[in-house]
Amino acid sequence: MAQSQSDAASIRPRATETGEEKKVIFASSLGTVFEWYDFYLYATLAPFFAALFFPKGNETAALLSAFATYAAGFLVRPFGALVFGRIGDLVGRKYTFLVTILVMGFATFAVGLLPTYESIGWAAPILLVSLRLLQGLALGGEYGGAATYVAEHAPHGRRGYDTSWIQTTATLGFFLSLAVIGGCRVGMDVKTFADWGWRLPFLVSAILLAFSVYIRLKLNESPVFQKMKDEGKGSKAPLTESFLHYPNNKFVLLALLGATAGQGVIWYTGQFYALFFLTITLKVDYLTAYTLIGASLLLGTPFFVFFGWLSDHIGRLKIILAGCLLGALTYFPLFGALTHYANPALEAYQAKTQISVEANQCDFHLFVGPWSKFSECDRVKDFLTKQGLSFKSAPATGDAPVVTKVGSIEVKGWDEKALAAALKESGYPGPANKDQINYGMTLLILFIMLIYVTMVYGPIAAFLVELFPTKIRYTSMSLPYHIGNGWFGGMLPLTATAMVAATGDVYYGLWYPIVVAVMTLVIGGLFLRDTKDVDISK
């Protein structure tokens, strides 16, 4: 470990926050809520953006493109962590996260002004990706700064509790994005929202930006960082010391594989993948899905603070790893139960109707663009996948490039009308019937998955801050956090959707978060130890 524990045990925690401590938590959290709100506007609208910014003709391909753009913002986050983490360790915490919030605010506002694919062709998704990259860079610098800033103000014995308020901001930002988008969709008809209404949530972010910057300008520099600078003990090369010097580089790698990778996939499964599963696979209407997810967030958010507080008493790592274990053990039955309670007619249809696709030329599409070519088999699988249906794949047995069997009905080649007629004739129920949704049980399942999220996410900021020394803390903690969340977590919707389309099993994408969570459980359990008693003032 980079920090000594010799004098930590003698420091007694304060019972309550001071006024300055509360101000720091509020100001840091408020700005971070705004940044997550900006970032998640696109995430929440990703299926909708597929029709706005990508060519028509293959809906799963367009959806994968939208998810790829969504993932681009996550993939670039570690580079933002390097750029802004270095500045934060050299110049200061306060200055750095003022810059990140301005970059994020500009990129989000600009999305609201973008022309669509219909107006300017492929330039539209290129501009959209560019703005997503700017958002990812900014977010890569924001989180580490906010978490470090709060932790360096917190007294020993309260770091888990104080930093857990930062952990609530991602969920609150997601909740805020759902609320604003839901309000827009309720207040206008479908055509109006598709024409221009979708721009409003992006444009109003300018108001939130102005308020957040005003609040942050009133903050002082972190006392721990200022003391280090006054004593001339700061790092002149934080990147080199973080990633090329032992043992710090070892802890960076262990933090990634033994903590943040599993935390990332648990988090994105319980919030985003659950939302996409409801709307895309189970055909629950957007407003109902937003309401259910929003209600689960509202019920679950206090548990971020609870598990942060609990980590001050029993340790951070064991809570994080317990959340990974629970997710890995229960995701398959939980998502199966989600189907049972949210769209029972679809479950009954799948149970009685055997669907198979016989073909020799089918491809696995992950990153989709102008270079992509889609066979007849790809188009059939696209059609079935967007209906939320599982199917079996088999080699071709005749001359037709693809043969689809829906119960006793056989459709040769790619013929969308014939496939739609076959599904209708076989009793396919279509969108979820609101009267058949068991709202109580569906909400309970979403709440359970959110509890896993709070377990892995509530203590993670304090754990990462305590793992690294002050002079390189911003840089060292930011990179593993953003690779774990941005790469392992952010790639989840894209990868899981591609796995479902390729295999024909609507649950197959769950193997991705399960495997990553198990990896984190093993590596974290074997090679990491808890950090709650570390003195971070050094």
Image (tube, grey):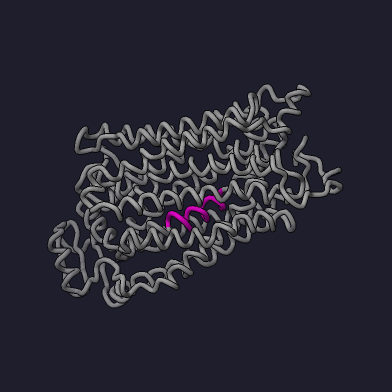
Q: Position of residue 241 (x, y in %)?
A: 68, 29
Q: Position of residue 140 (x, y in %)?
A: 52, 36
When the figure is inspected, residue 471 is found, relative to residue 396, above or below; the finding is above
Q: Which residues are magenta?
A: 261-273
Q: Is residue 277 left or right of residue 215?
A: left
Q: Report which quarter residue 39 is drawn in.
A: top left
Image quarter where the C terminus lies is top right
Q: Is residue 214 left or right of residue 185?
A: right
Q: Does the segment drawn in magenta span residue 269?
A: yes
- Out of 249 and 314, give the one closest to the viewer: 314
Q: Does the segment drawn in magenta span residue 424?
A: no
Identify the main secondary structure in magenta: helix
Task: Report how many numbered discs are placed on residues in the image.
Answer: 0
Residue at horizontal 73 percent and vertical 24 percent from the top:
229
Q: Position of residue 331 (x, y in %)?
A: 49, 64
Residue at horizontal 33 percent and vertical 42 percent from the top:
200
